Image (cartoon, grey):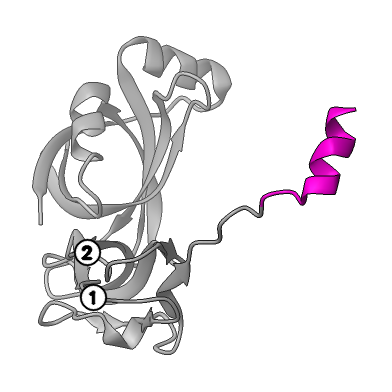
Amino acid sequence: MADVKLAAETRTEFGKGAARRIRRDSKVPAVVYGHGAEPVHITLPGHELQLALRTPNVLITLDIEGKTQLAIPKAVQRDAIKGFLEHVDLLVVTRGEKVNVEVYVHTEGELAPGAYLLEHVLSTLNVEAEATHIPESVTVSIAGLEAGDSILAKDIPLPEGTTLVTDEDAVVLQVLAAQAEEAPAEGEAEATEA
């Protein structure tokens, strides 16, 4: 799990105009909340935050004017067209605390020989893990699976200290037989040409 340290500044201006000025200075407006404390409105360095958010469930150590705070991203708002960060919500966590997060499901191996398709019914699993040991992803083998086979959430191996929150009987992956397109009958082919 990645641990990133970012310097943050508290902010007192709010609204669209203030947010635009913050973004124009290559910074991102953010809010830190949790543990029953009042939300703290901050600005974060845009480029460093963008790099940190490339890692799923990154643990961020915030230096808010000399005081350190651990947080994980809870909501990230991006511009729909240009993709730059518009706003980030960060959830305060402490070492040893359990948090619910989503982790991506990756596959390894090859399906059995034949015309099969792998359908990702769920691309992520909800899990509970210690805040400083959140897995980036989980991996499951699909080697030798055939049409009709499926992998349930309970079948996916989780790292030690991580528990499944998603319904254990939820289908995560299933294998389907590829369907060939039917060729038109002779009479139909002639009718369409005419």
Q: Residues within 10 Å of mark 1 (few under 14, many from 20)?
A: few
Residue 21 sits in quarter = top left
Quadrant the N terminus occupies: bottom left
Residue 96 sits in quarter = bottom left
Q: Which residue is mark 2?
A: 110
Residue in the foreground of this view, choosing between 34 and 74: 74
Question: Which residue type does callout 1 highlight?
Answer: Gly
Q: Which residue is mark 1?
A: 144
Image coordinates of residue 73 in percent, x first then y, are 31, 50
Image coordinates of residue 183 in percent, x first then y, are 67, 50
Any magenta on residue 188?
yes
Q: Is residue 177 left or right of residue 112?
A: right
Image coordinates of residue 13 in percent, x first then y, are 46, 24
Residue in the foreground of this view, choosing between 104 and 43: 104
Q: Identify the residue at image location x=84%, y=29%.
A: 193
Are discs 2 and 1 less than 8 Å apart at CB? yes
Q: Is 29 rendered above or below residue 25?
A: below
Q: Identify the residue at image location x=78%, y=47%.
A: 186
The prevailing secondary structure element of the residues shown in magenta is helix
Image coordinates of residue 130 in percent, x first then y, are 17, 74
Q: Which label's residue is closer to the chain start, 2 or 1?
A: 2
Q: Is residue 93 shown to the viewer in this render?
A: no
Q: Is residue 6 left or right of residue 191?
A: left
Q: Residues within 10 Å of mark 2 (few under 14, many from 20)?
A: few
Question: Which residue type does callout 2 highlight?
Answer: Glu
Quadrant the C terminus occupies: top right
Check disc 1 and report its element: helix, strand or loop.
loop
User: Which stretch appears magenta?
Assistant: 183-194
Q: Is residue 88 left or right of residue 49?
A: right
> Which dot marks residue 90?
none
Q: Is residue 188 left or right of residue 98?
A: right
